[in-house]
Image: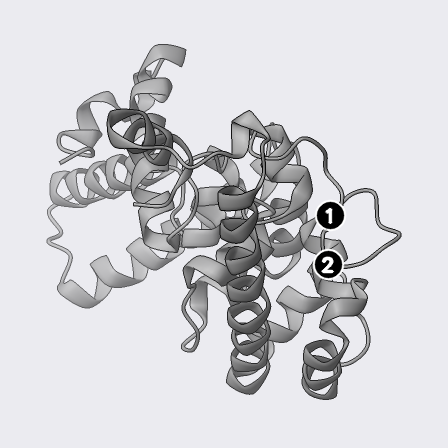
Amino acid sequence: MALYGAPVWAMDMTASTLAILRKPQRAMAVRVVRGYRTISYEAACVLAGSPPWDLEAKVLASLYRWREEERARGSRPVQRQIALRREELRQVLVAEWRQRLLRPTAGLATVEAIRPVLDDWLGRRHGSLSFRVTQVLSGHGCFGKYLCRIDREPDARCHHCVHCGEDTAQHTLAECVAWEEQRRVLTNKVGGDLSLPALVRKMVGSAESWDAVVSFCEDVMSQKETAEREREISTPFPGRRRRTGRRRRADNALFRPP
Protein backbone atom coordinates (compact mmCIF):
# COMPACT_ATOMS: atom_id res chain seq x y z
CA MET A 1 0.00 0.00 0.00
CA ALA A 2 2.90 2.39 0.70
CA LEU A 3 3.80 2.48 -3.01
CA TYR A 4 0.24 2.82 -4.30
CA GLY A 5 0.14 5.35 -7.12
CA ALA A 6 3.94 5.58 -7.23
CA PRO A 7 4.08 6.56 -10.94
CA VAL A 8 2.19 9.75 -10.03
CA TRP A 9 4.26 10.98 -7.08
CA ALA A 10 7.63 9.17 -7.29
CA MET A 11 9.48 11.98 -9.07
CA ASP A 12 8.09 14.76 -6.87
CA MET A 13 9.09 13.58 -3.41
CA THR A 14 9.97 16.10 -0.73
CA ALA A 15 11.87 15.68 2.53
CA SER A 16 8.58 15.27 4.38
CA THR A 17 7.42 12.61 1.91
CA LEU A 18 10.66 10.70 2.43
CA ALA A 19 10.21 10.87 6.19
CA ILE A 20 6.66 9.54 5.87
CA LEU A 21 7.93 6.59 3.79
CA ARG A 22 10.90 5.82 6.01
CA LYS A 23 9.07 5.53 9.31
CA PRO A 24 6.91 2.49 8.44
CA GLN A 25 9.67 0.93 6.33
CA ARG A 26 12.07 1.06 9.27
CA ALA A 27 9.46 -0.51 11.56
CA MET A 28 8.79 -3.31 9.07
CA ALA A 29 12.50 -3.94 8.45
CA VAL A 30 13.17 -4.17 12.19
CA ARG A 31 10.42 -6.78 12.48
CA VAL A 32 11.81 -8.76 9.55
CA VAL A 33 15.26 -9.02 11.15
CA ARG A 34 13.84 -9.49 14.68
CA GLY A 35 15.89 -6.56 15.93
CA TYR A 36 15.71 -3.94 18.63
CA ARG A 37 13.62 -0.93 17.74
CA THR A 38 16.64 1.32 18.21
CA ILE A 39 18.31 0.02 15.02
CA SER A 40 18.71 2.80 12.47
CA TYR A 41 16.76 3.06 9.23
CA GLU A 42 19.82 2.35 7.06
CA ALA A 43 20.99 -0.63 9.11
CA ALA A 44 17.51 -2.15 9.42
CA CYS A 45 16.85 -1.89 5.68
CA VAL A 46 20.18 -3.31 4.62
CA LEU A 47 19.89 -6.19 7.10
CA ALA A 48 16.38 -6.95 5.84
CA GLY A 49 17.42 -6.58 2.20
CA SER A 50 14.70 -3.97 1.78
CA PRO A 51 15.68 -1.19 -0.66
CA PRO A 52 14.48 2.32 0.23
CA TRP A 53 10.87 2.72 -0.79
CA ASP A 54 11.55 5.96 -2.61
CA LEU A 55 13.88 4.03 -4.94
CA GLU A 56 11.28 1.29 -5.33
CA ALA A 57 8.77 4.00 -6.26
CA LYS A 58 11.10 5.32 -8.95
CA VAL A 59 11.37 1.82 -10.42
CA LEU A 60 7.59 1.55 -10.61
CA ALA A 61 7.33 5.01 -12.17
CA SER A 62 10.05 4.28 -14.74
CA LEU A 63 8.47 0.97 -15.67
CA TYR A 64 5.08 2.63 -16.07
CA ARG A 65 6.49 5.38 -18.30
CA TRP A 66 8.37 2.86 -20.43
CA ARG A 67 5.21 0.82 -21.02
CA GLU A 68 3.28 3.97 -21.93
CA GLU A 69 6.01 5.03 -24.37
CA GLU A 70 6.01 1.58 -25.97
CA ARG A 71 2.24 1.69 -26.38
CA ALA A 72 2.46 5.19 -27.89
CA ARG A 73 4.78 3.75 -30.55
CA GLY A 74 2.24 1.04 -31.32
CA SER A 75 4.12 -1.70 -29.47
CA ARG A 76 2.61 -3.78 -26.69
CA PRO A 77 5.42 -5.31 -24.55
CA VAL A 78 5.03 -8.99 -23.76
CA GLN A 79 5.60 -10.37 -20.27
CA ARG A 80 9.20 -11.39 -20.99
CA GLN A 81 10.09 -7.87 -22.15
CA ILE A 82 8.48 -6.37 -19.07
CA ALA A 83 10.41 -8.75 -16.82
CA LEU A 84 13.71 -7.85 -18.52
CA ARG A 85 13.00 -4.14 -18.19
CA ARG A 86 12.06 -4.57 -14.54
CA GLU A 87 15.35 -6.40 -13.89
CA GLU A 88 17.32 -3.61 -15.59
CA LEU A 89 15.63 -1.04 -13.40
CA ARG A 90 16.25 -3.21 -10.35
CA GLN A 91 19.97 -3.20 -11.09
CA VAL A 92 19.88 0.60 -11.33
CA LEU A 93 18.06 0.71 -7.99
CA VAL A 94 20.69 -1.45 -6.26
CA ALA A 95 23.50 0.66 -7.71
CA GLU A 96 21.87 3.86 -6.44
CA TRP A 97 21.21 2.27 -3.04
CA ARG A 98 24.86 1.22 -2.82
CA GLN A 99 25.90 4.81 -3.48
CA ARG A 100 23.64 6.04 -0.70
CA LEU A 101 25.16 3.52 1.67
CA LEU A 102 28.53 5.22 1.22
CA ARG A 103 27.19 7.99 3.47
CA PRO A 104 25.04 6.39 6.18
CA THR A 105 23.76 8.64 8.93
CA ALA A 106 23.68 5.81 11.48
CA GLY A 107 24.40 2.09 11.75
CA LEU A 108 27.83 2.65 10.23
CA ALA A 109 29.43 -0.69 11.21
CA THR A 110 26.50 -2.73 9.91
CA VAL A 111 26.23 -0.81 6.65
CA GLU A 112 29.98 -0.92 6.00
CA ALA A 113 30.00 -4.68 6.56
CA ILE A 114 27.18 -5.45 4.11
CA ARG A 115 27.67 -2.78 1.43
CA PRO A 116 30.67 -4.48 -0.29
CA VAL A 117 28.64 -7.69 -0.73
CA LEU A 118 25.23 -6.07 -1.16
CA ASP A 119 24.38 -7.99 -4.35
CA ASP A 120 25.26 -11.30 -2.71
CA TRP A 121 23.36 -10.37 0.45
CA LEU A 122 20.22 -9.56 -1.53
CA GLY A 123 20.49 -12.55 -3.85
CA ARG A 124 21.50 -15.27 -1.40
CA ARG A 125 19.42 -18.45 -1.24
CA HIS A 126 20.44 -19.48 2.26
CA GLY A 127 20.33 -18.06 5.75
CA SER A 128 17.88 -15.99 7.74
CA LEU A 129 18.42 -13.62 10.64
CA SER A 130 17.44 -14.51 14.18
CA PHE A 131 17.08 -12.12 17.12
CA ARG A 132 20.55 -13.08 18.39
CA VAL A 133 22.32 -12.93 15.03
CA THR A 134 20.84 -9.48 14.48
CA GLN A 135 22.19 -8.36 17.86
CA VAL A 136 25.73 -9.23 16.76
CA LEU A 137 25.39 -7.71 13.28
CA SER A 138 23.77 -4.49 14.52
CA GLY A 139 25.51 -3.99 17.86
CA HIS A 140 22.10 -3.39 19.42
CA GLY A 141 21.61 -6.04 22.04
CA CYS A 142 23.01 -7.55 25.20
CA PHE A 143 26.34 -5.68 25.14
CA GLY A 144 27.62 -3.40 27.88
CA LYS A 145 28.05 -0.43 25.56
CA TYR A 146 24.48 -0.67 24.26
CA LEU A 147 22.93 -1.41 27.66
CA CYS A 148 24.74 1.58 29.15
CA ARG A 149 23.49 3.75 26.29
CA ILE A 150 19.87 2.87 27.04
CA ASP A 151 20.44 3.23 30.80
CA ARG A 152 20.20 -0.45 31.64
CA GLU A 153 23.80 -0.66 32.90
CA PRO A 154 25.86 1.88 34.88
CA ASP A 155 28.85 1.44 32.58
CA ALA A 156 29.90 -0.28 29.35
CA ARG A 157 32.23 -2.90 30.82
CA CYS A 158 32.12 -6.59 29.97
CA HIS A 159 30.81 -8.78 32.81
CA HIS A 160 32.34 -11.93 31.32
CA CYS A 161 36.03 -11.01 31.31
CA VAL A 162 38.22 -8.98 33.66
CA HIS A 163 40.05 -6.39 31.61
CA CYS A 164 37.52 -5.09 29.07
CA GLY A 165 36.13 -1.64 29.75
CA GLU A 166 33.72 -1.67 26.80
CA ASP A 167 31.63 -4.68 25.88
CA THR A 168 30.63 -4.44 22.22
CA ALA A 169 29.45 -6.85 19.55
CA GLN A 170 32.98 -6.98 18.16
CA HIS A 171 34.47 -7.67 21.60
CA THR A 172 31.98 -10.51 22.08
CA LEU A 173 32.69 -11.88 18.63
CA ALA A 174 36.47 -11.71 18.53
CA GLU A 175 38.00 -10.95 21.94
CA CYS A 176 36.10 -11.96 25.07
CA VAL A 177 37.90 -14.87 26.76
CA ALA A 178 34.63 -16.26 28.07
CA TRP A 179 33.70 -17.43 24.58
CA GLU A 180 36.98 -18.99 23.49
CA GLU A 181 35.51 -22.45 22.89
CA GLN A 182 32.60 -21.14 20.83
CA ARG A 183 35.03 -18.89 18.93
CA ARG A 184 37.32 -21.84 18.17
CA VAL A 185 34.40 -23.74 16.61
CA LEU A 186 33.43 -20.66 14.61
CA THR A 187 36.92 -19.92 13.27
CA ASN A 188 37.28 -23.54 12.17
CA LYS A 189 34.41 -22.82 9.76
CA VAL A 190 34.93 -19.19 8.73
CA GLY A 191 38.64 -18.55 9.30
CA GLY A 192 40.49 -16.37 11.76
CA ASP A 193 39.31 -12.93 10.61
CA LEU A 194 36.29 -12.11 12.76
CA SER A 195 35.92 -8.50 11.73
CA LEU A 196 32.31 -7.80 10.81
CA PRO A 197 32.98 -7.25 7.06
CA ALA A 198 34.93 -10.51 6.84
CA LEU A 199 32.26 -12.39 8.76
CA VAL A 200 29.44 -11.12 6.54
CA ARG A 201 31.46 -12.00 3.45
CA LYS A 202 31.81 -15.58 4.73
CA MET A 203 28.13 -15.75 5.67
CA VAL A 204 26.91 -14.90 2.18
CA GLY A 205 29.55 -17.20 0.68
CA SER A 206 28.16 -20.47 2.01
CA ALA A 207 25.30 -21.92 4.04
CA GLU A 208 27.84 -23.74 6.20
CA SER A 209 29.49 -20.49 7.27
CA TRP A 210 26.11 -18.85 7.86
CA ASP A 211 25.04 -21.74 10.10
CA ALA A 212 28.32 -21.52 12.03
CA VAL A 213 27.69 -17.84 12.77
CA VAL A 214 24.11 -18.60 13.82
CA SER A 215 25.34 -21.32 16.17
CA PHE A 216 27.89 -18.98 17.77
CA CYS A 217 25.39 -16.16 18.20
CA GLU A 218 22.63 -18.35 19.62
CA ASP A 219 24.97 -19.96 22.17
CA VAL A 220 26.86 -16.86 23.29
CA MET A 221 24.03 -14.32 23.24
CA SER A 222 21.65 -16.61 25.12
CA GLN A 223 24.24 -16.85 27.91
CA LYS A 224 24.74 -13.10 27.92
CA GLU A 225 20.98 -12.57 28.11
CA THR A 226 20.71 -14.97 31.05
CA ALA A 227 23.51 -13.14 32.86
CA GLU A 228 21.79 -9.81 32.23
CA ARG A 229 18.52 -11.09 33.66
CA GLU A 230 20.35 -12.28 36.77
CA ARG A 231 21.97 -8.86 37.20
CA GLU A 232 18.59 -7.24 36.67
CA ILE A 233 17.21 -9.17 39.62
CA SER A 234 20.17 -8.77 41.96
CA THR A 235 21.60 -5.30 41.30
CA PRO A 236 20.59 -2.06 43.02
CA PHE A 237 21.27 0.01 39.85
CA PRO A 238 17.92 1.82 39.21
CA GLY A 239 18.03 1.68 35.42
CA ARG A 240 18.49 -2.09 35.50
CA ARG A 241 15.71 -2.98 37.91
CA ARG A 242 12.98 -5.18 36.53
CA ARG A 243 10.06 -3.16 35.20
CA THR A 244 6.59 -4.05 36.37
CA GLY A 245 3.17 -3.36 34.93
CA ARG A 246 2.72 -0.45 32.58
CA ARG A 247 6.28 0.87 33.04
CA ARG A 248 7.82 -2.45 32.03
CA ARG A 249 5.58 -2.74 28.98
CA ALA A 250 6.53 0.78 27.92
CA ASP A 251 10.22 -0.01 28.36
CA ASN A 252 9.88 -3.18 26.34
CA ALA A 253 8.12 -1.29 23.56
CA LEU A 254 11.12 1.00 23.28
CA PHE A 255 13.97 -1.45 23.47
CA ARG A 256 12.79 -5.02 22.90
CA PRO A 257 12.10 -6.62 19.54
CA PRO A 258 8.48 -7.12 18.52
Tag 1's secondary structure? loop
Q: How is colour applied across the structure in the image?
A: one colour
- Specify the quadrant of the image occupied by residue 182: bottom right
SS under mark 2: loop
Q: Amino acid at mark 2?
A: His
Dot 2 surroundings within 10 Å: few (below 14), some, or many (20 or more)?
some
Residue sitting at 61 percent across and 48 percent down? 110
Crowding at mark 1 (Cα within 10 Å: few <14, some 14-19, many 20+): many
**Quarter containing the N terminus:** top left
Per the rendering, the mark at residue 167 is: 1
Numbered badge on residue 160: 2
Toward which corner of the image does residue 82 lie, by quadrant? bottom left
Q: Residue at x 44, y 74 (%)?
A: 127
**Measured along the vertical axis of the image, is residue 104 above or below residue 86?**
above
Q: Amino acid at mark 1?
A: Asp
- Residue 240: % across, % down: 53, 34
Is residue 107 among the parts visible in the rendering? no
* Quarter location, residue 61: top left
Q: Position of residue 81 (x, y in %)?
A: 23, 62
The answer to the question of whether label 1 and label 2 lie on touching residues, with beta carbons closer than 8 A, is: yes
In the depicted view, which residue is nearer to us: 7 or 1?
1
Residue located 55% across and 33% down the image: 152
How far is mark 1 from mark 2, CA to CA? 9 Å
**Residue 84 seen in this snapshot:** yes
Give percent across and percent down for residue 66.
24, 42
Q: Is residue 104 left or right of residue 60?
A: right
The residue lying furthest to the right in this view is: 163
